[in-house]
Image: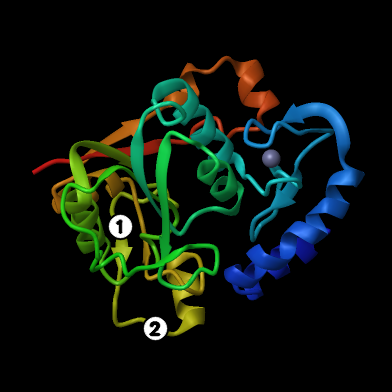
Amino acid sequence: MKKAISFVIRYIPRPILQTVSPMVMKVLSQLNKGNEVECPVCKNQYKKFLPYGRIARENALCPSCLALERHRLMWLFLQEKTDFFTGKLKVLHVAPEHCFIERFEALPNLNYITADIESPLAKVKMDVHSIQFPENTFDVVFCNHVLEHVDDDILACSEFNRVLKPNGWGILQSPVYNLEKTIEDKSITDPAERERLFGQRDHVRKFGKDYAQRLRKSGLKMEENLFVKELPAEKVKRFALAPDETIFVCRKGN
Ligand SMILES: [Zn+2]
């Protein structure tokens, strides 16, 4: 089972995975019924979540809404630390995650725009290097697990900074490794070599502990938020969160 999931994640393109997987997951969710863990996104309870990842980690993927640890944490953060569910906000969501789209679209307080260069899940076709919206357009920008794929992560962030309103904020998650400095080499295009160096066949860099500092070059203000540390241990276990995950919150800067 773990091996099969690793294989699927590695070789089947994500857009296809996102379209097909809900049907498969429905069957899997029936097999995991229980009440040991709870998904804050879809509110379903299970014996445990499904394994997920290239080196499959246990208790990660919600079989109902496909939320992972990071999605469950982001949902709780939005609920407890922001006015996302109540404020009148214009939101740009780049490469929207399956578990969030319908739920955010249904929020009456939001003017919610999904955008991506290729994902069939997004409504607007958009290149993060050249965003077609005028400056000071959005109250909130989300762009998760994108910046490790794009040609110029700093340029993309300066575009987010431009389109954010003066009090605008966002969340910019990426895989961050235990390296002092981000590794990047744009001359490497071979997928196998990219996987060896950057962790995945379509990654063009591997972010290190300088992630927030690096993104500040774009003009954005970056905060390394450890919201998960404020949560009681029972909640971290109940929602199956990653106990050390940092949320990278950005705010419009200069
Ligand atoms: Zn769920």
Going 23% across and 68% down the picture, which residue do you hit? 130
Q: Which residue does the numbered mark 2 point to in the structure image?
A: 189
Residue at the spot 71% in from the left edge and 69% down from the top edge: 8
Judge whether 70 appears above or below 238 on screen: below
Q: 204 and 151: which one is in front? A: 151
Name the front one of labels 1 and 2: 2
Q: Which residue is mark 1?
A: 182
Residue 182: horizontal and vertical position, in percent? 30, 57
- Label 1 sits on a secondary structure element that is loop
Distance in Å between CA atoms under marks 1 and 2: 17 Å
Q: Residues within 10 Å of mark 1 (few under 14, many from 20)?
A: some
Ligand 1: quadrant of the figure = top right
Looking at the rendered image, the quarter that the N terminus falls into is bottom right
Instruction: Judge from the rendering whether residue 73 lies leftward or rightward of residue 173; answer left or right.
Output: right
Q: Position of residue 157 (x, y in %)?
A: 24, 55
Question: The residue under label 1 is which amino acid type?
Answer: Thr
